[in-house]
Image (spheres, grey):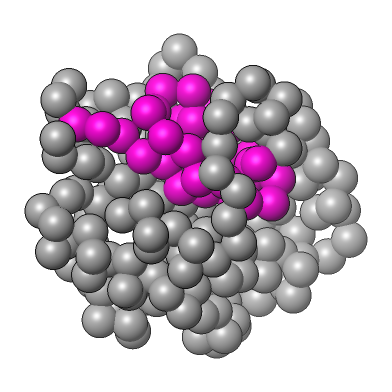
Amino acid sequence: MNRTFFVDFDGTIAEKDTCMLMIERCARDGWQEINEKWEQGELSTKDAAQKTFNLLDCNLQDIMDLVNEVKLDPKFKKFVDKVENQGDKLYILSDGYDLFIREILAREGLSYLPYYSNELQINGNGNFYINTPHSVNYCELCGTCKTELIRKLASNQDETIYIGDGSSDRCAISCVDKVFAKDKLYKIAIDKNIDAVKFSSFKEILPYV
C-alpha cells in the first residue's frame, strides 16, 4: 500500500513558528488577545491575521530577516529522503504564509516539495494582507482547510499519515489513518479520542517510515 504524508510547517518542519516569530518581534501590544481568540476558535485565521497586521511595526525586509533565523528540524531532510525512496507522497499543509515557506524551503534545497498555504501579500501602501486560496465556504475557521486538501490529494487506496503540532491541525487529524502529534496537537488528539504517536523530532518518526 502506498502512503501519503501530510505535514504541517510551522513548529513541525520548521523548529520555530514563523508567524509567531513575526508577531512577537514586530507587533504592538494587543496581539496576545487576538491570538488567544484564534486559538479558541473565536476568530478565523483571516480575521486574526488582518487584525494582527494592523499592529505590525515592520516592513518586508524586517520580516525576511526574521525568517533567516528559522531552522528546519535536523532530521526533516532525512525523512524526506526516506519517503521519496519508498515511492510515497508528501505534501506540506500550512495555515501560515507562502512567503516564509517558499524562502525557507529554497534555502534548504527543498523548493520542489509541494505545499499549500495562505498567501502573504502587500498592497501599494506597503500594508500586509492575507489571501486564502485554500479556504472553504462551509467553514471559515482556517485560511487553509487541511481536511479538504487531504480529501482532494489522497488516493482512496493510500494510507494517510498526518504530522503536526498545533491548533490548525485539529480537524485534519480526524480524517487520516495515522497521526504523529507534538505539543498542543497531542493534547487535542487525546481530547478528541484520536490515537496519536507523540513525537518531538522527525528522528522519532523515521522508524515508522
Q: Tell me what residue is drawn at x 64 percent, y 42 percent.
A: 185
- Decide which of 41, 157 is in the foreground and name it: 157
Query: Could you say which quadrant of the image residue 114 lies in?
Result: bottom left
Residue at image point 81% right, 54% down? 31
Q: Residue at x 49, y 23 (%)?
A: 174
Whether residue 129 is in magenta: the answer is: no
Q: Position of residue 108 (x, y in %)?
A: 33, 82
Residue 47: % across, % down: 63, 37
Please report the residue visible at 54 percent of the width from the left and 66 percent of the height from the top: 201
Q: Is residue 195 visible?
A: yes
**Percent x, y for residue 7?**
40, 50
Which sits in the foreground, 65 or 85?
A: 85
Q: Quadrant of residue 152?
A: top left
| Residue 44 visible in image | no
Is residue 144 shown left or right of residue 160?
Answer: right
* Region of the chain picked out in magenta, as a range: 158-186
Q: Residue furthest front?
A: 207
Q: Is residue 183 magenta?
A: yes
Nearest the camera: 44 or 57?
A: 44
- Which of the two residues, 175 or 39, is positioned nearer the viewer here? 175
Viewed as shown, does residue 103 lie left or right of 82? right
**x, y (%) of residue 124?**
45, 63
Q: Is residue 16 above or below residue 205?
A: below
